[in-house]
Amino acid sequence: MRRDFRYSTIIAAAAFGAMLAISSIVVWLGFWFASQTLDAELERHNQHYRRFTELHFRTHLEHLENFLSVLSHNSALVAGLREGNNSAVEELLGKAFFELDSGELDILFVDPGDGGRIIDVSSSPYNSALLVRDAAAGPLPESPRLFAVQTADGATITAFVSGLQIIDPISRAVTGRLFGGVILNDNPHVLRALMEDTDLTAIALLVDNKVVAELSARGRPGVTENGEPPTATKITIPFSVSAGGPEAVIKAIRSTNPVSDLTATYLRLLPVIIGLVIVLAAVLSGFIWLVTMRSLSELSRYADAVAATIEGGGHIPQFQSGPMREFNSLGDTIERVFSAFRESEYRAESVIDRAPAAIFAKDLDGRYIIANAEFLSIFDLRKEQVIGEANEGLFPEEFVQEIRAFEKSAADREDGTAVELTVPTVKGERAFLGVTFPLRDDTGTIYAYCTILADITARKKAEIGLRHAKEEAEFANSAKTSFLAGVSHELRTPLNAIIGFSEMIVREVLGKIENRNYVEYAEHIQSSGHHLLSLIGDVLDLSVIEARGEAVRDEALDLEQLGVDCVRMISDQAGAAGLEIITNINLKSHALKADARRIRQIIINLLTNAVKFTPQGGRIELSGQLQEDGRVRLTVSDTGAGMDAATKALAFEPFMQGSSNMVRKAEGAGLGLALVKRLTELHQAELECVSAPGEGTTISIIFPARRSVAAPPFQSVLEVGQ
């Protein structure tokens, strides 16, 4: 009970202090907001005064300018200036001068120009001759200008002066300049209207910080005098109505100051507000103390029971309502929170137990805090054996060391890469793929490490089977290639004999043959032998490349001359077929770094293939160029039958031929393009084929930029090819 009393007192005192502080802050914020609002309103009023002042002066000066504009168009004035009749001009200006009241027009004169005498009818208590002199000496102002001159006795005369040109409407010539102005010194006329239209009680016009005119309401002191009540506010209004001249400022007095009024009112009400806040805070604090005192005892008892239940692992007791109904919901809420916690823990365990992988977590001391059903099944353990236990108490020492090595390796991989682990289980050794990651609390602190192990035993067995199958396939392919190479070598010897003896018969080396049919048969034997020997050569080359990956003997090749020689070698065959072959190779003083014999073989195979499948009258082109990216492109194009997509997909595979009539008529076993593809890959080059039925075929070999070198002096390409 003594503890509950202390807690209740602390809560009540804290509530009292908090309410007092909040109330003070609210009152201060209200005052601050009101003062800020008033300051903004005062600033807006000051801007309004400035705009109103400028408008007042501009209106007065526009009235002056309108007067001068009308006067400058007076025909009598223009005629007098044209005729040089100064007396008539002076008489006219005198009459016009007295049309306006004193204070609206103090200066009026005409400058006829060309050194003529200034005609001045100005009238003012002040000596305006200096102002007339300065205004006439300068250029004609585009807008009213503020002038300030100093007399001999040190006094400063200030005036707004405006001017216009007097133009003869007949000759359109300027006959003079007309000036008019208002002297501001002791001129109440320019200030009276401003004070009447505002709440200002006194106004002073300052030019260059000197007072030139001042006006105040009856019974009120002026701006430069003392005696104004403390609530009055002095304001400064800078304004500008002309582009040049000295600085002009209006200083004025307002009769009231809203900020001072608000401050005084707030200070008067502040003690009352503080008293009310203290009383209200004391009453609420007493109520809070009473409520908490009567309810904390029941809540304390329930909290102790919950803590004891959690430590013991039993069920959470039901909350018993206390004497204060308002606090019963708090106990019910605590009961629901702990019940929801237990239900959430049960759902999480259910999900983890149904996962097809072993999942476990250990705290920083290495003791298990989570172990799902799959983990327990793999190691034939029970949950009560595992939770709270370390590896040393569950597994043999050798396996414990393997687990430590696995956990260290997995934890070092921050990218989450999985690590393989072989685990001895009750069903024998099994392969697992595992990943370990830290578990963090709300502050980011690591409190445990979780590991997930996925059984990959079946996948590992499948991988081993695939690897064995791949090795067997590679062995069978190697055996096939070796067999083809051996058979090709064995067939060449009898074929050479057949070709040689058939050639002797055709040439009738041992004597003339009477029956010419035998000679024709011998020619067929010789032709067939050459074809079969070429086929065996292609098979042998293909098998050698596939069997041991023949190395490339790189050298700088004159591709242009090599192309010409290759075209020459098949020119007879092309001529017999009625085809035109042209070459267009230009590598821009560069050479191709490649194997001469293999490049020659590529070109001849491509040209031979083009001759086979191009009808009579067709055209074959061998071209080559150096691309902008530095790569070398070698191209053979023809106007033959072309290939469809299905034929093109199989054209570069060994022993594959198309099904068109022209393909069936052509000789060959389908090794030419396959050999071209293998030799292209041997040079790390790319092969492109563009073909369509009836549009011909274009095959390009693109060599990498590193095979393009500066062209050295070349020897005979045929010698290199041999």
Image (cartoon, rainbow, N blue to C red):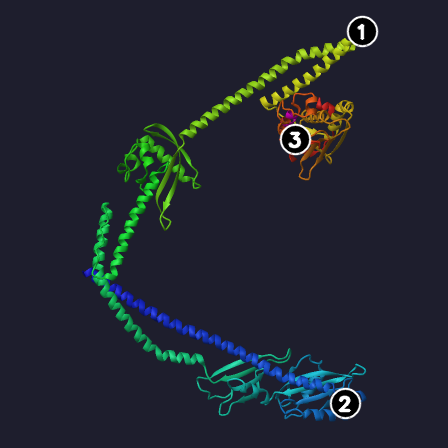
Looking at the image, residue 311 sits to the left or right of residue 142; the answer is: left
Q: Is residue 70 above or below residue 330?
A: below
Q: Which amino acid does label 3 sit on?
A: Asp
Of residues 393 and 358, the one nearer the viewer is 358
Q: Which of marks 2 and 3 is in front?
A: 3
User: Residue at point 49% right, 90% down?
Assistant: 220
Is residue 232 found left or right of 713 in the rendered image? left
Helix, strand or loop status at disc 2: helix
Give x and y (percent) for residue 54.
Answer: 59, 80
> CB atoms at circles 3 and 1 under 8 Å apart?
no
| Most distant residue in the left direction | 1
| Quarter of the figure with the C terminus | top right
Residue that badge 3 annotates: 644
Where is residue 99? Give x, y as percent.
Answer: 67, 92
Whether the magenta-drawn stretch holds residue 522 is answered as: no
Start-end of magenta stretch: 673-677
Is 221 situated above or below 436?
Answer: below
- Residue 69 spot, x, y in % from top left: 70, 84
Q: Is residue 542 above or below residue 375?
A: above
* Local crowd size for mark 2, using a 10 Å CA cut-off: few (<14), some (14–19), many (≥20): some
Look at the numbered disc 3 and give the secondary structure of its residue. Answer: loop
- Mark closest to the chain's N terminus, 3 or 1: 1
